[in-house]
Image (cartoon, rainbow, N blue to C red):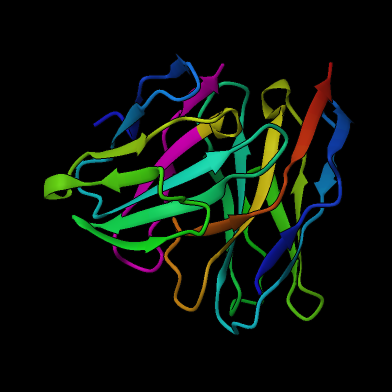
Amino acid sequence: DTGVSQNPRHKITKRGQNVTFRCDPISEHNRLYWYRQTLGQGPEFLTYFQNEAQLEKSRLLSDRFSAERPKGSFSTLEIQRTEQGDSAMYLCASSGLTVNTEAFFGQGTRLTVV
Amino acid sequence: AQTVTQSQPEMSVQEAETVTLSCTYDTSESDYYLFWYKQPPSRQMILVIRQEAYKQQNATENRFSVNFQKAAKSFSLKISDSQLGDAAMYFCALPRGYGGSQGNLIFGKGTKLSVKP
């Protein structure tokens, strides 16, 4: 296992198009998190899953955003009708269930909406 | 509300010298963790060090150590013998909510550390 993997690494899309990102967590990790990071800012929490259940969603996750984690393995984050304000780095992280388990981050998907 | 504040947008240190990055936070929880993450350019974020709030002893990981002042809600990171590879963005982070998992985090805005040879 080489860690948390995110694809694609970069995505350029036209405003109004839909995009989908994929995250493959560390295989034994039950929890998976999505964050958004804009330039000069720290990551902002979007949502997280425990196995296949989506347990929490941030107010940042508008109706145009949807995340899934079928079968509790990989996860996808879809943005519909992209806007220029969606341009950001989207980070995925995964962790185990115990309180003191560390979260591991992927390299992120950089989205540019033109 | 829980908050994390990093008041130093940028810091610079000479190679082999020591630098301290500041972080203050606010939480109503009595038991929690605090973290410092490092994000090198175009690379993934990695955990540098973590502190459990109920432990009075400051955490240390090789050249990295923290100064945790619970009453003051201060959590600074000291990097000793700075190396060129330490150049990165550094983020202070706090788990969200009671019993928040260590991946469900509130991050500060970060401090960009430059290391001069």
Please determine whether, in this image, residue B56 is positioned above or below residue A53: below
Q: Give the left or right position of residue A58, taking residue B75 as reference.
A: left
User: Camera-side residue: B54 or B45?
Assistant: B45
Magenta highlight on residue A62: no
Residue B81, visible in the rendered structure: no
Q: Give the left or right position of residue B114, taking residue B26 as reference.
A: right
User: Camera-side residue: A69 or B66?
Assistant: A69
Q: Residue A95, percent across and down?
A: 34, 52
Q: Give the left or right position of residue B23, taking residue A76 as reference.
A: right
Please determine whether, in this image, residue B26 is positioned above or below residue B19: below
Q: Residue B68, percent across and down?
A: 73, 67
Identified at 48% across, 59% down, the residue is A58
Please determine whether, in this image, residue A55 is positioned above or below residue A49: below
Identified at 33% across, 45% down, the residue is A66
User: Camera-side residue: A99 or A55?
Assistant: A55
Q: Residue B82, percent across and down?
A: 77, 32
Identified at 68% across, 31% down, the residue is A39
If the image is split into quadrants, where does the C terminus of chain A sit? top right
The region drawn magenta spans A90-114
Identified at 46% across, 16% down, the residue is A13
Residue B74 position by quadrant: bottom right
Residue B66, visible in the rendered structure: yes
Magenta highlight on residue A101: yes
Residue A79 position by quadrant: top left
